[in-house]
Image (cartoon, helix red, strand yellow):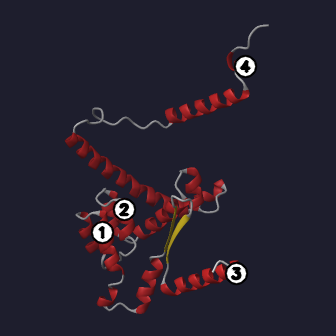
Amino acid sequence: PQPPLGMNAFGPIEREQFGQNVRLAMACIESAPQPIKGCALPQDESSIRHRLKALSQEITSHHADLLELLVRFDNLQGWKSSGASHCAAWMNFEIGISLQLSWEYLRVGRKLQTLPTTIALFRVGKLSWSKIRLITRVADSENEDTLCHAALDASVSEVKRLCEGYRWNEDENNKNENERALQQWASRSLTWNQASNGCTRIQLVLPPETAQVFLNSVEQSLHQLGTV
């Protein structure tokens, strides 16, 4: 009998693997980035340093566009047509951003709509994403320019210390309790990551009253489970 030819020469597993390889190859071809203008990637230390700074600034600028577009997309509820329950779920499935980071992108993107100086510096690549996410937790119309000016020539660690110092210094400016409560509410956050032993580490930032209610609820649940 004549031996099988072409794909018939392979079993079902080999054919499936071949199909996967073709799909991956086509995805790489169809989404190939535009070639970088100029010569190949640099080799000497000085040129590499220059290229790293330029590339970082370019990525930061695109990052600003990404956040603005995501907020617009969420406002238009563009995620509904795909069956997603919310924008973060759509981002997680369609563009490969984790749920945790998706919510953070939306938070920062919305906050930037109220901070013209911050978004301008973000858009031209002068303030990195790491600095932006810190600044947006404490910036307002009164302190925005000061924070941005200090952040331009500071490391991310220095910006973090600066913003942490700003967080509860408003009493010196005679701000009332309502303004403080609003700032506390705007500073809410929920982050989590997996520890090396497989456990999940959770960090939750809440206003004092809400935090106490949450802790009481957790304590009650733990008592019901008999773990405390």
Mark sitting on residue 130: 2
Question: Which mark is in front, 2 or 3?
Answer: 3
Q: In the rendered structure, which disc, 1 or 2, sits on the residue that comes first in sequence?
A: 2
Q: In the rendered structure, which disc, 1 or 3, sits on the residue that comes first in sequence?
A: 1
Q: Is residue 151 visible?
A: yes
Query: What residue is pinned by disc 3?
Result: 224
Q: In the rendered structure, which disc, 4 or 1, sits on the residue that comes first in sequence?
A: 4
Mark sitting on residue 137: none
Whether the residues at callouts 4 and 3 have beta carbons within 8 Å, the answer is no
Alpha carbon separation for disc pair 1 and 3: 43 Å
Residue 3: horizontal and vertical position, in percent? 74, 10
Instruction: Tell me the element at label 1.
Output: helix
Alpha carbon separation for disc pair 4 and 3: 61 Å
Residue 212: horizontal and vertical position, in percent? 54, 86
Query: What residue is pinned by disc 4?
Result: 8
Mark sitting on residue 159: 1
Question: Which mark is in front, 4 or 3?
Answer: 3
Question: Which mark is in front, 1 or 3?
Answer: 3
Whether the residues at callouts 1 and 2 have beta carbons within 8 Å, the answer is yes
Q: Amino acid at mark 3?
A: Gln
Q: Horizontal placement of 182 versus 173: left or right? A: right
